Image (cartoon, rainbow, N blue to C red):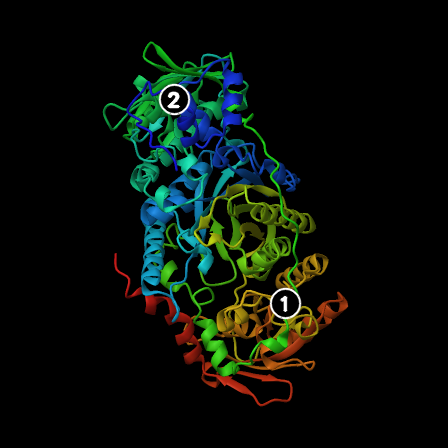
Amino acid sequence: MNTPIDLSRQNLPVTPQTVAAHGLTPEEYEMIRRILGREPNITELGIFSVMWSEHCSYKNTRPELKKFPTNGPAVLVKAGEENAGVIDIGDGWAVAFKIESHNHPSAIEPFQGAATGVGGILRDIFTMGARPLFLLNSLRFGPITGDNIDTARLVRNRALLRGVVAGISHYGNCIGVPTIGGEIAFDDSYEGNPLVNVMCLGLLRHDQIARGTAAGLGNPVFYVGAETGRDGLAGAAFASRDLTEESKKDRPAVQVGDPFREKLLLEACLELLATDTVAGIQDMGAAGLTCSTCETASRGGSGIEIDLEKVPKREPGMTPYEIMLSESQERMLIIAKKGREEEVLRIFEKWDLPCALIGFVTDDGIMRVRCGSVVVSEIPARALADDAPVYYREAAAIVTPPALDIGSVPFLDPCLALPELLAQPTIASKRWVWEQYDYMVGTGTVVPPGSDAAVFRAKEANKILAATTDCNALFCRLDPREGARHAVAEACRNLSCSGAEPLGLTDNLNFGNPYRPENFRDLREAVVGIAEACREFNIPVTGGNVSLYNQNPAGAIDSTPTVCVVGLIERNQDITTQFFKIPGDVIFLLGPNSAEQSSLDASHYLLTLHGRKEGLVPRLNLQLEVHLQTALRNLIRAGLIASAHDISEGGIAVALAECCLGPGSGLGAEIALDTHDRRTDEILFNEAPSRVILSTPRGSAQAVENLLTWRGLPVRRIGRVLPSREGLMIRVGTKSQIIFPIDALRDAYEAAIPSVMKSCRD
């Protein structure tokens, strides 16, 4: 049990109990003593505790992250160099993008936890000198439906969902940055430990890239933005331990956000960066003032000295410990060029924001903290930012689950199974969520939430961007390496279906306690899987986040290595959506014949309708996947494709239904599928990879078929688009045709989440 710490006591003695309460081991404490050549005081102990936490130091994962490919001709800022990676998009323009988590704070205070997660990722982007263009998110919750689940659990999970969505929408809507896409899933493993991963992308010119470096002896150090309070105290350390009932009581670790002040801060910082007065700039995010000072000094190979008496504060009597470890929001550290102080002060006065000269750059490599004339901390900056201990954790043996015995799975009538799958919250429409987001603010959104990928026009650069987030955690639970390969492939497939060529990837690795060998094995395998897929697609990992210690009393969450891939669409006419367009269009199935390669292993049909997380994750042929996606993009650029939609959760039956449920009344389809002596439910609901449903005008159908066959890709005509009144008609083999009315499918798909959330009130 952690020992409570009285933070008001500036001279609190450092005892073994105090060290343990800060999440430091005895061995780490001895390292600290050797670095300092003396005993640390309580402020210094707190500083080491947050900077050496997993959240800031990646001490358990740094060796694994080196496996990612991070180079490429378009990479302008590599992963790990700065607050976000930067990728060239042509004509002197670039994008900065990154995804980060706010899981633990959202579990105990969903609204503020999610809202401040948005605020933090926005600052990571405009710290780079980029104007944020849009947000995406990837969310995971415990179940919100289920006949056999305790009502109190359902109510709690629904409240978490409502709070998180409200927090995201509040912050993004108020600051005026649209949330244009993402994903949401529900599963028992996230009970009490939801995942809130938020991604932001910003636009900048090559010459606008800003650096988080404290350079230039004597350069002044400014604190700008909101005043420091006691909210968010030691949040990085809080995020680096198991979430328990005891730790949930640590409410001061949850920050409080103010999106209106963030908007002022954003505009002031971008205006300042345009004046060439800035030598370095850094967000005060995790670990607050501590992180921003030591990281900028370490990057610059310099030192830094600050005076806490000059730091704007909103609460009286704050100790040095509290000021240094606070994670109050909407704050930045700016290293200005000497002699340009008045320009900095003038701009922040214009935007009505606190701005204080709190220190200067030194050349001794020390992060020195004063409180007036009293030195309260002296620590080598590099020891904090770069020299944290690195651990090579024990990994359990790799276990590949056996293939599913299809005979053990009772057959279900597809007429009942498809509507039930469409109503499963992980698969169902997320309209209830994204209608709370102002996804059209700024008028750049071209394809809003609801299709394979979001598409956004960056008008200033005259570029069309696409982005999506993805992770099939069921696959990753059963086989984290193969599941992570699938996550990258599906995200890229979503972009290709939208007409975009993938450019780069940012990841959020959500796992359990790394001290448990089975959890560390899963993390290591997932990293290898992502790396393998990125190399095959020739896209770099531009950065991201690791979130560990995601546990509940039943164990770790299902391994969830979320990926977000960003792509570029060349022309307006290449923008493609998943919905059928015109009755009479020909429907193709592009990709391997699933009846010959897969059963119901690891499928949502097996999970949702039979309650089983079992089977061998379908094997992914990355070479075929890349070849198929390249051919698909070429067909789109040739103007031959009306719609494209990848087949994933729920199999081809769910994908066909989603193609039919377009805007307005939607459209129907007549489909004929081969059986190859497989059961009907295997054909309709298996989740074999590398498959896409295409529709094309009748006059283009033969050209599409010829081109794909010439490229050696498997493709089959499976039907035609019908008016909506005729429904979705599917014939499997020689069996009778199954007819699904479009209105019935839409009711199941659209009403699932609203029907359960209407009973949940703030």
Which circle, 2 or 1, is nearer the viewer?
A: 2
Q: Which residue is mark 2?
A: 43
Q: CA distance from mark 2 to mark 1?
A: 55 Å
Residue drawn at point x = 44 percent, y = 23 percent? 293
Say above or below: 261 vs 182: above
Q: Residues within 10 Å of mark 1 (few under 14, many from 20)?
A: many
The reply, left or right, for residue 738 in relation to residue 144 is right
- The quarter of the picture where the N terminus appears is top left
Q: Position of residue 494 (x, y in %)?
A: 56, 59
Between 608 and 530, the one nearer to me in the picture = 608
Residues 632 and 188: in front is 188
Give the labeled residue for mark 1. 688
Q: Are marks 2 and 1 in contact (CB under 8 Å)?
A: no
Q: Amino acid at mark 2?
A: Thr
Spot the residue most to the top. 373
Q: Amino acid at mark 1?
A: Ala
Instruction: Identify the image quadrant of the C terminus.
Output: bottom left
> What kind of element bears circle 2?
helix
Q: Is residue 559 above or below residue 272?
A: below
> In the depicted view, which residue is nearer to us: 686 or 579?
686
